Image (cartoon, rainbow, N blue to C red):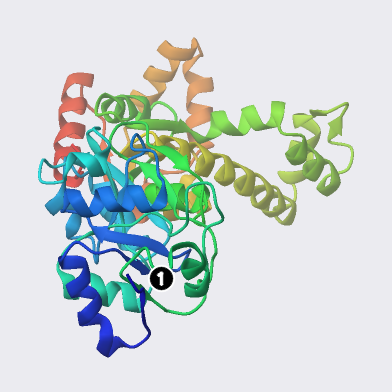
Amino acid sequence: MKTKIITKVEELPEAAALLQAGGLVAVPTETVYGLAGSGLDPAAVEAVYEVKGRPAVKPLSLMVPDAAAMERYCEEVPPQAKALAERFWPGPLTLVLKARDLVPEIVRAGGETLGLRCPDHPLTLALLRLSGIPFAAPSANPSGAESPRTAARVLDYFDGKIAAVVDGGPCGLGRESTILDMSRRPYRILRQGALPEEQIADALVDCLEIVGVTGGSGSGKTTALKALEARGALVLDCDGIYHELLREDRELLAQLGEAFPGTVENGVLQRKKLGEIVFRDQAALKTLNAITHAFISREVRRRLRAFAMAGGTLAALDASELLESPLAACCDFTLGVIADEELRAARIMARDGLSRDYALLRIRAQRPDSYFRERCDLVLENNEDEATFLSNINTILEEKLHHG
């Protein structure tokens, strides 16, 4: 058999006909060349295994032209998978999902899952659409050999053993796609390839619904957060994270010590000294906020990435200064919780064992209700019993949330 070299778009129908007839055609992608056979033809898939010398226990991925193929070949497709396809396809990301029965068992190597990949190369995308079939297409090299970046290298391996090579020029990345298993939670990187895990995690964070919750002491923020937690939300206490960082993050302490000399002693922040500086000087307070907000935001982002990679869908940020920080931009909406002053004082007295006068001093040192009314997307008054407040919160969440 003579291997045909195809270089022109006008010749693609011939390559499509070869694939439809069960032949093997090497195709270019943005990473490396793939050895393609019809992913719906068990005999063609068997030929891919045989020519490549690939162990039969290793499943194959299918190349597809677009995200619509997910529903066609897979079941239980999570919204996050569609979002990743929208972000990164065509591109070097293979998504592993539960396969439908129409996918031949040989493609799945007897398993229940299937990898899908949409290659970022115009000739291969055109060929996928022309042929109307998905391609079972591992890298076009004998198992164990270097993955080919050029058509010439493919011919070195398989000249006379495959029907054709579509010569699309050198592949740009030269590294296989990243494989992400989304068939179960937590999601797992099965192979780190050309697409970094951090970019995938960031895209999944963008899929999260994030609610920002803020309000003064005794207003009822904790009850609102419990309602969110009951719906599966990851609740992040930003003030608590800040105090953790002060204990554990040497970089943060170093920056504070440099910005405010004498406030960090033996690796411990001297809060009283810092307070004496920043509460008398608005410029110093602005510097402090810029430093701390950056570190808190970075840590919150890290935790959101981990939660999103675990398959999470809903998160809540609890921060007293949420509306003044960069984290407000992460929120789908912000919820301000307010209550009458006397009720807040009574709650603080019962919770913290403080006198009424001291509780009122604390309240009056915080933001007024007007601040939350003007800046929050939603404001909820908590002037009744806890059961009524919970009912009101859940009504709002039912209306606003998409993930339950």
Describe residue 166's horizontal placement relative to residue 383 as left or right. Answer: right
Please provide percent x and percent y for residue 241. Answer: 57, 31
Evaluate whether residue 394 shows in this view: yes
In the foreground, 283 or 94? 94
Residue at left 26%, top 48%? 46
Please provide percent x and percent y for residue 361. Answer: 53, 29
- When asked about the image quadrant of residue 132, the answer is bottom left
In the foreground, 327 or 126? 126
Amino acid, disc 1: Pro
Residue at left 41%, top 35%? 307
> Considering the numbered disc 1 on the image, is that residue within a helix, a strand or a loop?
loop
Please provide percent x and percent y for residue 245. Answer: 66, 32
Residue ID for mark 1: 28
Residue 195 in the image: above or below residue 179? below
Please provide percent x and percent y for residue 388. Answer: 16, 24
Q: How many marks?
A: 1
Residue 351 in the image: above or below residue 221? above
Describe residue 22's horizontal placement relative to residue 228 as left or right. Answer: left
